[in-house]
Amino acid sequence: MAKAAKMRVIIPRNPEDLLKLAKKVYEKHLVDGGASPLNNMVDQDWDADGPKIDQAILMHLQAEDFKLKMEEMYRQRDLLESNIKETLLASREILSGVHRSNMKRMGEWGFSIDDSPKAKVPKKSV
């Protein structure tokens, strides 16, 4: 006689899928009413948690929308930042020449000046 395979009941890790499953379970619980075996739970209560599912789904959808908007804002920022960075680098070079004898004066422009000795790179042994 063949040994029966051990079965598992999967609970999704993905929030969207978890909420969809919760909604299905809650709807079945409501349809079954007083005959629902879920009424026997002691520490958990679908009557309290079930109505929160739609709110959680709405919040999830809003968060996903914000995520798309955020990604678009980052793309737009990156397009602007590219030219700004080049202008900043060119400005640093000009000011480095102007203030060559006293580089700390570049701090007046907002630049951070590091005057500590540069660390020596150890030589590789062959």
Image: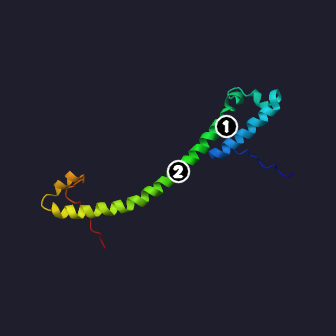
Residue 12 visible? The answer is no
Question: Could you tell me which residue is drawn at 47 percent across and 57 percent down?
Answer: 75
- Helix, strand, or loop for circle 2? helix
Q: CA distance from mark 2 to mark 1?
A: 23 Å
Labelled disc at residue 54: 1
User: Is tag 2's residue or tag 1's residue first in the polypeptide sequence?
Assistant: 1
Q: Residue furthest right?
A: 1
Q: Nearer the viewer, residue 4 or 63?
A: 63
Which corner quadrant of the image does residue 21 belong to?
Answer: top right
Amino acid bearing label 2 = Lys
Label 2 vs label 1, nearer the camera = 2
Q: Quadrant of residue 123?
A: bottom left
Q: Is residue 27 above or below residue 90?
A: above
Residue at image position (81%, 49%) is 4
Q: How is the image coloured?
A: rainbow
Depth check: give the residue in front, 56 or 122.
Answer: 56
**Which of the pair 77/41 is nearer the observer?**
77
> Position of 18 compared to 73: left or right?
right
Q: Position of residue 87 (x, y in %)?
A: 31, 62
Q: Is residue 31 left or right of residue 82?
A: right
> What residue lies at 71% left-to-right and 26% top-to-bottom?
42
Q: Residue at 63% x, 47% y: name it.
A: 14
Q: Which residue is mark 2?
A: 69
* Quadrant containing the C terminus in the rendered view: bottom left
